[in-house]
Amino acid sequence: MNRLLHRAVPVLEWTGWKITKVERGYCESVLPLSVPTTNQHGTHQAALISLSADYTGGMALTTLLTGVPLTGIHRGHPNRSASLWLASMDVKYENPSTSHLRGVCRIDAKTAERIKSRYFGGRIVLVTLTVEFFSEDNERVAVAEMKYFAQATSQLLRDREDGQRSSLSKLNLKKSARIIAGLRAQRSRQEGQWICREDGIKIRIDGGHDMFAAGTHGLLQAERLQKVLPQLQSMVAARTINADDVLRSMPEVEQLVMLGAGLDMRPLRLSNHLKGATVFEIDLPEMLTERQHVIQRMDKQIGGTHQTPERYQIAADFLRCDVGSKLRDHFAFSQTAATLVIYEGCSMYFEHEQNVRLLSSVMRSLKNPASRLWLDCVTPAVIHANTGDPNIHAFVDQMEMIGEKFIYGPTDIAGFLVECGVKLDKFVTAGNVLDDDDPTLAEYRFVTACRDSVDLESDPA
Ligand SMILES: C[S@@+](CC[C@H](N)C(=O)[O-])C[C@H]1O[C@@H](n2cnc3c(N)ncnc32)[C@H](O)[C@@H]1O
């Protein structure tokens, strides 16, 4: 538990805080007196005692949720996990803390029963627990009243009765799109791009669009994931380069369809190439609202989005809607226009049949032989944890922990594409794109496919 907590909350590791004893309804911890935890008087910093109280009480509460993984700490599907957080606290500092500090939280039997019956009865738990702190000579240093909220994550994620998504599921949605934008931004931030101003001075421009879209949260999450899988940034860079190249290789492109558009700013970034084209951004309604919000703020703050191609948003849940028919019904969509469909960063989150249903419905709506599909996918070894690279599996674990479990990687790409109504045109790995023979990069693949002319003729209009 100490190892898991340290990984999830790095400040705990930094301070040397750890759990020293647990029993059902009981937790004891220690906050060492050390250079990182003391203030100028050589006593513990008050805020760190509060931090210790938070996790000591939280852990005592966790001991009552027998067999239930904690969201953000343990692996496990959200449907089986518990969400736990601190709602408020009141800490009284009674004496200076000048030695290692022992934190103690004991939950009385009656309160413990109430917590268990509410949690396992599917209800919200709101409980105030007392955490006491003692110095090495057993003098009480502080006492904290900590109020916790706990509920089954599945209940928190459940959409509201009016069909609106819950706040937690909205937050999760934004999170994955922000992380991807953060990874794209990291690369361009490091390498930068140099342009020559009219006055001859060279200036560096960073991935402004992606950096803006990611925000502080996305950049930070990307940094954390990058530590787990050092090749991650290269993988995302390779996929951006490859999809951009495919788009640029279609000078005649008239439509760009972005399936699961998220916060991909490609229409803004490649606005020159897309001049005169129409862009369809398809995603869940909440994500599209966020996307529009980000683009509007970007326009105000960094400018430069006024020359974007014609963009239309189509709200669709891939699991519930016939996306092809939504496209065909859209007044601006033309089946005969040369179209590139980009399905980026999505295939790994859906089952084989779900991917096939979505892609075949969209691709069968395209009647121009120049139309293309681009998608990225992982190898089945990534899904089955047998790539031989422990970092990949630690990354997939981490993704599962943040609710982004990878579940699919096609074994037979050509066969998968045939089921989707297209045929394989080009297939490369991230390693091929970057000219790098690191075997980890070979686990990530980019595919370009086109409509089969025979299929095109035989399809009903
Ligand atoms: C990992 S993000 C990738 C976003 C974008 N393509 C990129 O590369 O930056 C996955 C996207 O799929 C969308 N998505 C997830 N589940 C979906 C569903 N059931 N229907 C439609 N979109 C979905 C998410 O909202 C998110 O924008």
Image (cartoon, grey):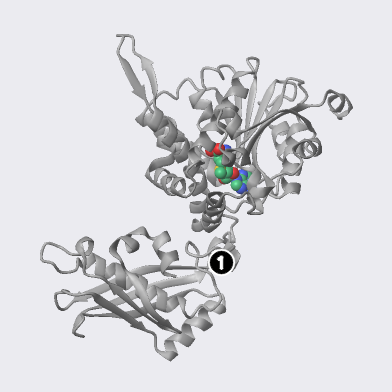
Taking depth in this image into account, of 281 and 67 the one nearest to the observer is 67
- Determine the quadrant in which ligand 1 lies: top right
Seen in the picture, residue 342 relative to 147 is either above or below; the reply is above
**Quadrant of the image for the C terminus?**
top right
Badge 1 element: helix
One can see residue 387 in this view:
yes
User: In which quarter of the view is residue 314 placed?
Assistant: top right
Residue 189 at what x, y percent from top left? 39, 32
- Residue 28 % position (x, y): 35, 80
Question: Which residue occupies 23% across, 74% down?
Answer: 100
Q: Which residue is mark 1?
A: 155
Q: Is residue 299 visible?
A: no
Q: Residue at x 51, y 53 (%)?
A: 172
Residue 33 placement (x, y as % from top left): 21, 69
- Expressed as whole percent of the image width and height from the top left, the position of residue 397 reads 55, 56
- Nearer to the camera, 380 or 283: 380
The amino acid sitting under disc 1 is Gln
* Residue at the outermost left position: 41
Residue pictured at 29% horizontal, 9% vertical = 199
Classed neighbour count for the residue bearing mark 1: other residues with Cα under 10 Å, few (<14), some (14–19), many (≥20): some
Which sits in the foreground, 45 or 364? 45
* Relative horizontal placement of residue 386, taking residue 192 as reference (left or right): right
Where's the N terminus, which quadrant? bottom left
Q: Quadrant of residue 127 in the image?
A: bottom left
Above or below 394: residue 2: below
Which residue lies at the image location 47% right of the left edge and 35% below the top edge? Answer: 184
